[in-house]
Amino acid sequence: MHASVRPAVSVNITPSQTGAIGRETTTALPMRMNVSKVNFFYGPKQALFDVSLGVATSKVTALIGPSGCGKSTLLRTLNRMHETVRHARLEGEITLDGQNILAQDVTQLRRRVGMVFQRPNPFPKSIFDNVAYGLRINGSKLPISEAVEKSLRHSALWDEVKDHLHKSAYELSGGQQQRLCIARALAVEPEVLLLDEPCSALDPISTAKIEELLVQLKDLCTIVIVTHNMQQAARVSDFTAFLLTGQVIEFNATPQLFTTPGDARTEAYITGRFG
Amino acid sequence: MSPQLRWRKFVSGFMLTMTGVCALVAVSVLFFILGYLVYHGGTSINWSFFTKLPKPVGETGGGMANAIVGSAKLLLLASLLGVPIGFLGAIYLAEFSASKVAFVVRYAADLLNGVPSIVIGIFAYSLVVLPFKHFSTLAGGFALGLMMIPITLRSTEDFLLAVPRALREAAMALGASKWKMIATVIVPAAYRGILTAVLLAFARVAGETAPLLFTALGNRFWSPGWNQPTASLPVAIFNYAVSPYEDWHRQAWAAGLVLLGLILVINIVARAVLARGIAVPRA
């Protein structure tokens, strides 16, 4: 069923040729975010080297690569979560809708670029209050209970929880908790949703549910997903970037990257020779 | 069974018994104290103990209403001073301070915690009693409040730091500013621990006598307002216990029982409140 959601346009974009992907592809596809020439440091240690890539609007972009390649670091720069780490430093430019995110108010930015983490991390509150949290702290004018229902429907959790919205979020299973976290992130209607290995703590059935969900969510927002699971990237994403030792080795439409990789290292990784 | 195995089993059984006995001793101390208090003080507890003032020497009967109210006022003042300072200081330490500052404040709080309570009493005496030229509820509450600060601060900080990083990240990723994250996620996630810490500090100072000797002094009558010497349960226990009168001794036991009972009731009520709401599961 996922095969039907492949991108209609076939774009061949390689960062090594262009530096910034966006430039070449804006004509074909609108870009929600653009990362250009980003270098990232944890103290003296450099984690990202001259990373450039574009995040296409209403598509799923996957970041793959072996552990420690910098894919989570790159993801966390997109809503500036890296700033919670001491001595972290970023050089370069990242834009959202053409505006530099590094110059924006960080809380405003994070309302527009939501995030779901590796392990489900619901608040010690009821299911309802978890989803309502973002709306409440942002002083949203929307009717909260309607927004909560809408988000829970979007994350395919509504039917399972509608009769016990006021129970503790911790009474849900791990997969349900993760979908609750997705609903919580969706409630503030972000333009971009970042997912950091969202299925790594889940069983195969819960994983399948979340993958199905991601494909549907494309209509609502742009998605960037980090995964160490190549099959998952192939199933859910429209574009895939392969990272290795802090560099983007190859960035292409997902079918192309997996069927005709342009770089020997990409081929070695996706055929399982390392990683 | 080889002798070696038999010896091992014996040692294992022996140690198990010892640990059990020690646990039993630890618990029975509490029950022994409780039983002793009930045995000696139970008969002197009646309605007038809670409602009447002490009788002059030689007359039997009377009560400690003034000491009960006095203790309540002192503890109220102490909590008003110690809890907010300890709590807000802990938030600064856990969430905002540089590690060097935190180290210094933590160390100072630990030292303050170790200062003998009688020294706190002398300090409050010179700071509050001398300038105002008389002993008062205010001075007593100040001394007790000082003692509550480090206990509240250190344990609150520990509970704040124990809130998982994942919850902080979740709040920040939703666009919460730092203070909103603290107010809506971190403190609610840690509030059980914080309340336990506050209770511990409260119970600790509720029984303090030494700092009150120089500050609240004691009073055989009602103490109107906040600016007069006041009776309190611990000081009343001290004065009655060292007196030569049999009747006063019984009343001292009764006061001890009341003091313990009050702390117990507050503890149980607070725990009942704590049992509601949602706790962060242990990882």
Image (cartoon, coloured by chain):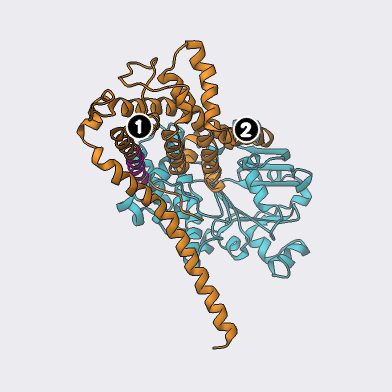
Chain colours: A cyan, B orange
Front residue (pair A55, B217)? B217
In the rendered structure, which amino acid carries the disc numbered 2? Answer: Ala
Q: Residues within 10 Å of mark 2 (few under 14, many from 20)?
A: few
Position of residue B203 in the picture relative to residue B107 (left or right): left
Disc number for residue B244: 1
Q: Position of residue A138 (x, y in %)?
A: 46, 33
Q: Which residues are magenta?
A: B259-275
Q: Position of residue A5 (x, y in %)?
A: 53, 58
Between the residue at mark 1 and the residue at mark 2, the CA separation in whole angstroms equals: 43 Å
Quarter-of-image position of residue A87: top right
Front residue (pair B262, A106)? B262
The quarter in which the N terminus of chain B is drawn is bottom right
Q: Position of residue A57 (x, y in %)?
A: 57, 45
Specify whether disc 1 shares its chain with disc 2: yes
Chain label for disc 2: B
The residue at 35%/40% (across/down) is: B260
State the count of labels: 2
Chain label for disc 1: B
The residue at 26%/42% (across/down) is: B42
Outermost residue toward the left in this view: B47
Residue B59 on the magenta span: no
Disc number for residue B108: 2
Quarter-of-image position of residue B231: top left
Q: Along the polypeptide, which appears first: circle 1 or circle 2? A: 2
Q: Is residue A62 visible?
A: yes
Residue B223 versus residue A207 in the image, above or below: above
Residue A135 versus residue A151 in the image, above or below: above
Disc number for residue A253: none
Residue B265 on the magenta span: yes
Quarter-of-image position of residue A226: bottom right
